[in-house]
Amino acid sequence: MEKYESDKTFLARWVAGELSEEELSEFKKSKVYQGFNRINNEAQKFKAPLVDKRESLIKTKEKITFGKKKKLPNITWYAVAASIAIVLGVFGVFNATKSYTTSYGEKLAVTLPDGSKIQLNADSELKHKRFFWINNRNVSLKGEGYFEVEKGEGFTVETTYGTISVLGTKFNIKTRSKAFELNCFEGVVRFDKYATEEHRILKKDDRVIISEDELIDQKNKETLPNWMNGISVFKEAPLQEVLDEIRMQYNVTFQDEETDLSRLFTGSFLHGDIEKALKSTLAPMGISYTLSKDKTVVFLQ
């Protein structure tokens, strides 16, 4: 947790110019500093309302006359700073996001503020609001992730293909540049496809994919996504999709100008061994290949 989140006086001391050099240096390195600084600069331009001196004098004399002398509050930088801190909290931090990313062949477990759990597959990114998230349980996903959502107010996942809405369930989303797949393992989820009025209600063992911009309903008998067991499985998938999956797991590039990447592949490959993965996917397709010595480039022949 950042210090400005745990220390209630931090923002006030920053505006008042009372942070230590170390505190200020660390704060400037944070992701939200620019937003805080921009709003603070604008706040400094605010002007206090005009005061009616005559009315104030009359009220002061009345208090003296009736013996109701009260010490007027001192307007200090801390008061101003506290007000600005509220503005910063509402406007500066509200739109701040927190993101999680995975690289090639990497997987990551994420726990959200409400206790929901997400497993991210390789080459994926998850984002959500950094603050006030519990009142707006919305995340965005690029790549692939397995969700175990805690029950509560509506939970939504935004993808480039559409929105998935849930209350409490387990499901897997695969959203790549040329592939979308949604599998429901428990509970109920709703998928709303962008740019159309099409939607689907998925229950346990239901699957929906998008192929050539068409929603296709399928069934799924798996208890967990295959990738969580270290295997990628394909059923009549374009070869391009298969090669993309290998690339994400092993950080390799493919060089070829003649192979028909629209051919359909049914089969699987295990994660953890690039040579076995290539053999189990390309050999059945009758495709010859050469793997570079550093195992970063695959030359298709």
Image (cartoon, rainbow, N blue to C red):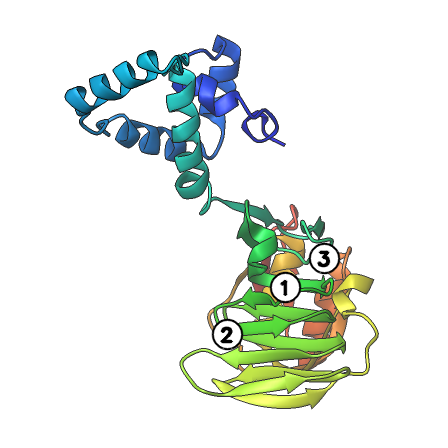
Location of residue 81 (image quadrant): top left
For mark 3, what is the residue?
116
| Amino acid type, label 3 | Ser
| Amino acid type, label 2 | Gly
Q: How crowded is mark 2: few (under 14 residues within 10 Å), some or many (20 or more)?
A: some
Q: Is residue 223 left or right of residue 283?
A: right
Location of residue 195 (image quadrant): bottom left
Q: Is residue 78 above or below residue 278?
A: above
Where disc 3 sits, the SS reads loop
Measuring from the top left, give residue 143's x and y in whole percent. Answer: 58, 62
Measuring from the top left, give residue 69's x and y in whole percent. Answer: 39, 12
Where disc 1 sits, the SS reads strand
The mark closer to the camera, 3 or 1, is 3
For mark 2, what is the residue?
162
The mark closer to the camera, 2 or 1, is 2
Tell me, yes or no, if residue 223 can be seen here: yes
For mark 1, what is the residue?
144
Q: In this view, does 189 lie to the left or right of 13?
A: right
Instruction: Give the CA distance from mark 2 to mark 1.
Output: 14 Å
Q: How crowded is mark 1: few (under 14 residues within 10 Å), some or many (20 or more)?
A: many
Mark 2 or mark 1, which has the lower sequence index? 1
| Residue appearing at x 72%, y 77% in the figure | 184
| Amino acid type, label 1 | Glu
Q: Nearer the viewer, residue 124 or 62?
A: 62
Q: Is residue 45 above or below residue 301?
A: above
| Residue appearing at x 54%, y 27% in the figure | 4
The mark closer to the camera, 2 or 3, is 3
Instruction: Give the CA distance from mark 2 to mark 3.
Output: 21 Å
Q: Is residue 102 left or right of residue 187?
A: left
